[in-house]
Image (spheres, rainbow, N blue to C red):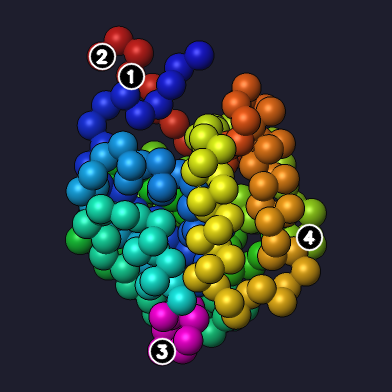
Amino acid sequence: MIRLGAGPLDRIVAVGAHCDDITIGAGGTLLTLCGARPGIRIDALVLSGGGTDREQEERAALAAFCPGADLRPTVLGLPDGRMPAHWEEAKAAVEELRARTGPELILAPRTDDAHQDHRGLAQLMTTAFRDHLVLGYEIVKWDGDLGRPAAYQPLSPEIAEQKVRLLQEHYPSQRHRPWYDREAFLGLARIRGIECHARYAEAFAVTKLTLNLGG
């Protein structure tokens, strides 16, 4: 088995269509990365929620999920659920992100996510960041769009529990949602852990990956 992540990893980009997308999909991975690489630079871009209470939730949550990191968050105010109608604004934001960052790793939604905002952002990322490793995180939802992931980040039980605690702590606006609970988050992490011989894990889709086996 080839394990990614053995080389330098100093800068990453994390993007979400909505506040809480990044932390739900890759919060455990962020905690793991920041614990292993103090001072890592994380440029985070969220397309919606800017200027609302959701922005404050997101900024506090990202700070908690990225302890010790050089965190640089941006939260825009595009309308939730209307990204196809605001394609040009979203594209400009992604291109600006590309121009000012040089990441070794990108965390983004999956290109086959059923939510149009997630899917649209994922498509923008794979065209703007053509020569980068893009890991597409998954978010459980009523659409039933979970698939067969290609990459896994094992999570220690402590990290998995911390992720759930931070999600509950930092997003009070989401607690009323029927899927936003401990069982959903830990249940999916447990299933993905089984698939990679770990207790818990986060899983990712990989659209394209270039290997350097002789390097």
Question: Looking at the picture, does residue 165 appear above or below residue 75?
Answer: above
Structural distance between the alpha carbons of marks 2 and 1: 5 Å
Mark 1 or mark 3, which is nearer to you? 3
Residue drawn where x is 45% and y is 44% of the image: 29
**The disc label shown at residue 143, or none:** 4
Query: What residue would you read off at disc 1?
Result: 212
Residue lying at the far top in this picture: please name it: 214
Left of 93 or right of it: where is 179?
A: right
Q: Amino acid at mark 1?
A: Asn
Viewer-side residue, 115 vs 49 = 49
**107 is within the stretch colored magenta:** no
Q: Closer to us: mark 3 or mark 2?
A: 3
Disc 4 residue type?
A: Asp
Q: Compare marks 2 and 4 and give the one earlier in the sequence.
A: 4
**Of 145 and 61, the residue lying toward us:** 61
Crowd band around label 1 with a 10 angstrom C-alpha radius: few (<14), some (14–19), many (20+): few
Magenta residues, as a range? 47-56
Is disc 2 in contact with disc 1, using a CB cutoff of under 8 Å? yes
Q: Amino acid at mark 3?
A: Gly
Q: Which mark is residue 215?
A: 2
- Residue 142 spot, x, y in % from top left: 79, 62
Question: How far is the residue under mark 3 from the one under mark 2?
Answer: 47 Å
| Residue at screen point 35% across, 55% down | 66
The reply to whether callout 3 and callout 2 are in contact (CB within 8 Å) is no
State which quarter of the image contains the C terminus.
Answer: top left
Q: Is residue 3 left or right of residue 144?
A: left
Question: Few, some or many C-alpha atoms within 10 Å of disc 2 (few <14, some 14-19, many ≥20)?
Answer: few
User: Label for residue 51?
Assistant: 3
